[in-house]
Image (cartoon, rainbow, N blue to C red):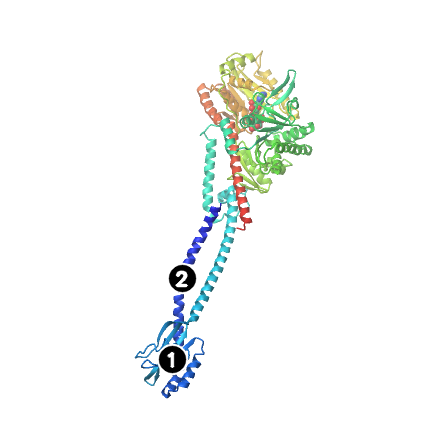
């Protein structure tokens, strides 16, 4: 540090010393020379003037040899302080008359035969003098020469004074210039700092580009200072590189595995604690006749996040909803999970019946769920539910704060149950990196406007550092909604929102599944086919379709059955040879909407089975119960076709699970165009589930699809799901979080640096 300061000082001092040396050795002698010449010229003219004044009197006194009057004349003239002495020399060079102080060493200086002024400088003991000789004439004859000796010591005095003045002037000028330079540098430094900060926040990069100024960013941002232009260019290039890198990450270049995710956490988020918050817990302990059993709930969120937590460790905070949950936790409400091979901690939060009713069933599932899924079920908003929602969000936020071991944990907030929590956590842990993932669709701004607490929901979500959606379409809807209802600045190119001095990065991160490892214990497809057909009492060549969902009105189960019915109508040859198995996990059964949906589904199955069934043959088999993962795998592997017909779905993991299960590269996926998965799985038979005939045609086409085509399609989809797995989903979010944390660290350093500089008065 000291060496650096010395080096910095030398950079300033050396040029200054050089300038002063030049001044002392070249400029000053030059100046002396010039001024001396000026003064000599002055003295010459003065000598002429004096001689001119004395000459008439001399011309009168000399012929009379009037020594007294000549003496008085000389003494009177030498009262002038500069004129030291006067002498008169005759034409033979004899000093005839002289004033009292006339220096003997001068004598008669010259005796030129011609007239005119002769002058010289001489160094006498009393200092430098100017000597001039001028002829004194009478008519045409020269009487002699008048010698004038003038003092030149004033020249030295004046030169010294002038030098002093110039040095003083230069010193003052230098101080003034230095002060002005420091002042201007300080202003530029501050401007530069804020511009760098803007760039780091991603502001100037797009501000600079008029193409990205949209209605969403109406505030005319100040143009970046011109000196920042090269830096902005570089940073834009870096950003582009980063985006390419990011695309590479989401491209085919490398596989994402649990190990790679772990390595990323260690390298880029070193030592940072990971906390997950979700409503649904990954493991539910239930009391049964056989004792306490543990189950993994049917939930896409749990499926995805659990795989990530196994890789990352940390703490998962969730609602303890199981009948034996309290009995299995320690005094901190912690339980290590997964039960067979614990790798992370589950922290349970207890809710009263009233809280669960208002927050979960009421606001989240009767309000937000139908609001975000355009599935023609009206959302219901009650003030009492909202109050519980706010209260429970705060309770979970408190749990996050209590579990945080540092002031900057990485908090992964899951889903629409916790829209307010990011802001609450941010208030207590301003340095936390909060990544919120919205697992369901985000509607257009008009539809979202129905929510009476829309501003509060948006404000809460913007407490996040990163906010993730499944698709670019949902992300765009969110940006437009924020633009419509909140006063923010949106940078569409960078996909960032600036609100209340904070920035939220909004991105699309399509979720996925953990690609299954080669499992030698997994039964062969042929065995699965035989087993399942035997369990269902069907012949070995019977065709099977499969649907696996939570029993939810958004999943298009009714439309799916209508498509099956239509296909059987159109293709009578399939009757008796095809069965559709629907595995439906009961969901939110406490809500009227779900109860009536359950009843509607059952009634429909009964009707279709009555219409096309005969004897033991049932065209639709409804298994409205939770199934274990192994069981689901067997069904996926045993079926010719899997139908995913959601009316609206964030992603839909069942589609990906079916593909992952088909290591024989056979089977056909019929997929709703309204799922996030349809954006990735182009080789599926994509349908509009509302168009029943289209669904029926696709189902039939799948059942009769030649094996070659099946294999081609399945192979391509399997490669895609394998590469775009859940570790990549989490990895991309965590990479972005690491980048933003790095940016914050740089900003903190810049702030600290400028604070120190301010304190030092620089
Ligand atoms: P979900 O609406 O729960 O998820 P989905 O993504 O299909 O929808 O996940 C359902 C999960 O539950 C799957 O893992 C499936 O295997 C499992 N499951 C379904 N029925 C089951 C049963 N009977 N028994 C056992 N398991 C069953 C929400 C969004 C989705 C988004 C996910 C993840 O609605 O759009 O894909 O979150 O973000």
Percent across and percent down for residue 485 are 60, 40
Please state if 241 lies on the left or on the right of 135 as rendered. right
Report the disc number at residue 87: 1
Report the disc number at residue 107: none
Query: Does 211 appear above or below 68?
Result: above
Query: Does 177 appear above or below 571?
Result: below
Percent across and percent down for residue 490 are 55, 41
Which image quadrant is residue 118 in?
A: bottom left
Q: Is residue 59 visible to us here? A: yes
Neighbour class for label 1 at 10 Å: few (<14), some, many (≥20)? Answer: many
Picture residue at 42% right of the left edge, 76% below the top: 84
> Which residue is tagged 2?
27
Query: Does 721 appear above or below 492?
Result: above
Work out which residue is located at the far left of the displayed protein and give it. Answer: 113
Q: Earlier in the sequence, mark 2 or mark 1?
A: 2
The residues tagged by marks 2 and 1 sit, at their Cα atoms, a distance apart of 39 Å
């Amino acid at each position: 540090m000291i060496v650096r300061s010395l080096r910095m000082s030398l950079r300033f001092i050396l040029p200054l010393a050089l300038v002063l040396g030049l001044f002392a050795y070249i400029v000053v002698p030059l100046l002396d020379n010039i001024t001396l010449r000026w003064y000599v010229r002055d003295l010459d003219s003065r000598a002429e003037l004096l001689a001119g004044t004395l000459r008439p009197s001399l011309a009168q006194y000399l012929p009379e040899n009037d020594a007294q009057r000549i003496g008085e004349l000389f003494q009177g003239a030498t009262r002038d302080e500069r004129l030291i002495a006067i002498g008169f020399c005759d034409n033979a060079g004899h000093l005839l008359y002289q004033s009292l102080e006339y220096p003997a060493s001068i004598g008669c200086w010259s005796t030129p035969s011609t007239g005119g002024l002769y002058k010289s400088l001489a160094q006498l003991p009393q200092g430098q003098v100017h000597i001039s000789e001028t002829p004194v004439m009478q008519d045409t004859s020269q009487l002699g020469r008048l010698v004038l000796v003038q003092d030149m010591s004033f020249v030295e005095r004046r030169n010294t004074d002038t030098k002093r003045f110039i040095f003083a002037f230069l010193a003052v000028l230098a101080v003034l210039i230095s002060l002005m330079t420091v002042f201007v540098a300080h202003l530029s430094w501050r401007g530069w700092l804020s511009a760098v900060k803007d760039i780091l926040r991603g502001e100037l990069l797009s501000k600079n580009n008029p193409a990205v100024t949209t209605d969403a960013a109406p505030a005319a941002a100040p143009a970046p200072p011109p000196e920042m232009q090269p830096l902005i260019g570089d940073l834009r290039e870096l950003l582009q590189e980063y985006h390419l890198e990011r695309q590479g990450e989401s491209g085919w270049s490398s596989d994402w595995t649990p190990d790679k995710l772990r390595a990323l956490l260690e390298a880029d988020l070193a030592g940072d604690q990971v906390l997950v918050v979700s409503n649904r817990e990954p493991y539910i302990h239930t009391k049964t006749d056989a004792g306490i059993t543990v189950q993994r709930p049917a939930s896409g969120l749990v499926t995805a996040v659990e795989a990530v937590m196994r890789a990352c460790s940390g703490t998962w905070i969730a609602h303890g909803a199981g009948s034996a949950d309290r009995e299995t936790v320690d005094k901190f409400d912690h339980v290590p999970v997964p039960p067979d091979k614990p790798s992370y901690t589950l922290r349970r939060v207890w809710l009263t019946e009233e809280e669960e009713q208002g927050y979960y069933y009421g606001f989240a599932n009767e309000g937000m769920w139908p609001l975000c899924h355009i599935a023609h079920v009206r959302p219901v908003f009650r003030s009492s539910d909202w109050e519980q929602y706010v209260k429970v969000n705060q309770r979970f936020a408190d749990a996050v704060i209590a579990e945080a071991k540092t002031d900057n944990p990485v908090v992964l907030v899951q889903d629409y149950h916790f829209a307010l929590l990011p802001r609450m956590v941010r208030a207590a842990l301003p340095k936390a990196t909060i990544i919120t993932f919205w697992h369901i669709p985000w509607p257009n701004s008009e539809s979202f406007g129905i929510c009476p607490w829309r501003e509060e929901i948006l404000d809460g979500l913007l407490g996040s550092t990163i906010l993730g959606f499944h698709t670019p379409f949902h992300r765009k809807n969110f940006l437009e909604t924020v633009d419509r209802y909140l006063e923010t600045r949106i940078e569409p190119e960078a996909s960032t929102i600036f609100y209340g001095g904070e920035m939220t990065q909004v991105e699309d991160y399509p979720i996925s599944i953990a690609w299954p490892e080669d499992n030698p214990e997994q039964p062969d497809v042929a065995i699965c086919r035989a087993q399942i057909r035997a369990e269902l009492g069907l012949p070995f060549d019977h065709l099977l379709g499969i649907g696996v969902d939570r029993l939810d009105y958004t999943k298009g189960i009714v439309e799916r059955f209508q498509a099956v019915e239509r296909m059987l109508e159109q293709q009578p040859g399939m009757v008796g040879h095809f069965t559709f198995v629907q595995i439906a996990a009961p969901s939110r059964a406490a809500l009227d909407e779900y109860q009536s949906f359950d009843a509607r589904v059952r009634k429909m199955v009964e009707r279709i089975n009555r219409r096309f069934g005969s004897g033991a043959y049932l065209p639709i088999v409804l298994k409205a119960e939770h199934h274990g993962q192994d069981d689901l795998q067997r069904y996926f592997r045993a079926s010719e076709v899997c139908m995913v017909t959601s009316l609206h779905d964030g992603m839909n993991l069942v589609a990906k699970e079916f593909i992952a299960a088909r290591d024989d590269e056979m089977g056909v996926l019929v997929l709703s165009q309204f799922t996030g998965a349809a954006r990735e799985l182009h080789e599926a038979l994509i349908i509009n589930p509302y168009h029943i005939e289209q669904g029926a045609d696709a189902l039939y086409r799948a059942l009769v699809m030649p094996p070659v085509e099946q294999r081609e399609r399945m192979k391509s989809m399997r490669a895609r799901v394998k590469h775009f797995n859940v570790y990549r989903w989490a990895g991309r979010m965590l990479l972005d979080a690491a980048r933003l944390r790095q940016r914050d660290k740089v900003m903190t350093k810049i702030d600290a640096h400028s604070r120190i500089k301010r304190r030092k008065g620089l």
